[in-house]
């Protein structure tokens, strides 16, 4: 009986290890370092229209006029998760899916299913609308700037030192956050 107790305890601990690793990292993460600086003196609610970045916590993602509450978080392994969310953006309610991975330096890589750069279009899937009825401004292509060059959509707000795909989905841990 005395030899069985440590064995039972070790089996129980091994069985519990996935359950212990299920949660997202503690803390508050912002989509940029400037956001962390703002969160040191004000909460997201106090920032209002100045909340021009994303805030991620264990409960969800917040930005100005948008809130996504995590409904469930499922671990892939000890450092990556999939989170389903219920989002509300100015009365528009929709589901979303987030892939979250912990990176070196305590940063998080966050990818979401919903593409927020595209506006919903009623005619996008309607094959009965002739293609010549689409205004050129509705087409998704590079725009020409005043100097004659092109400005691609990946350059808007992206840090030029990072690849475009990483610039929009890297979240940094905020050490000092007003509660």
Image (cartoon, rainbow, N blue to C red):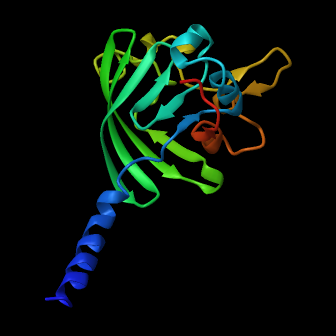
Location of residue 81 in the rendering, given as x and y in whole percent from the top left corner: 39, 51
Question: Would you place residue 6 above or below residue 141 in this image?
Answer: below
Residue closest to the eye, 41 or 142: 41
Residue 123 horizontal side relative to residue 66, left or right? left
Picture quadrant of residue 47? top right
Q: Residue furthest front?
A: 2
Work out whether residue 88 or residue 134 is closer to the camera in this orientation and state it: 88
Query: Which of the image's four quarters has the N terminus?
Result: bottom left
Residue 19's image quarter?
Answer: bottom left
Q: Residue at x 48, y 41 (%)?
A: 111
Residue at x 41%, y 21% (from the top left corner): 67
Position of 37 with respect to 15 (left or right) is: right
Horizontal and vertical percent position of residue 54: 55, 27
Q: Quadrant of residue 53?
A: top right
Q: Position of residue 149 (x, y in %)?
A: 81, 25
Q: Residue at (59%, 39%) from the top-left corner?
A: 171
As displayed, is residue 5 above or below residue 81?
below
Residue drawn at point x = 66 percent, y = 53 percent: 105
Residue at the extreme left = 1
Q: How many marks?
A: 0
């Amino acid at each position: 009986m005395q030899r069985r107790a440590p064995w039972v305890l070790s089996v129980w601990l091994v069985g519990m290890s996935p359950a212990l690793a299920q949660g997202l990292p503690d803390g508050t993460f912002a989509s940029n370092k400037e956001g962390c600086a703002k969160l040191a003196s004000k909460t997201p609610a106090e920032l209002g229209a100045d909340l021009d970045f994303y805030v991620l916590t264990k409960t969800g993602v917040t930005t100005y006029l948008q809130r996504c509450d995590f409904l469930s978080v499922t671990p892939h392994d000890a450092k990556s998760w999939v989170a389903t969310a219920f989002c509300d953006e100015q009365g528009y309610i929709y589901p979303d899916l987030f892939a979250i991975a912990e990176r070196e330096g305590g940063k998080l890589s966050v990818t979401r299913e919903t593409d927020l750069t595209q506006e919903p279009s009623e005619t996008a899937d309607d094959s009965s609308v002739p293609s010549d009825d689409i205004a050129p401004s509705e087409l998704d292509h590079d725009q020409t700037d005043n100097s004659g060059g092109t400005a691609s959509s990946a350059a808007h707000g992206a840090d030029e030192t990072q690849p475009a795909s990483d610039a929009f989905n890297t979240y940094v841990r905020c050490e000092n956050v007003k509660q």
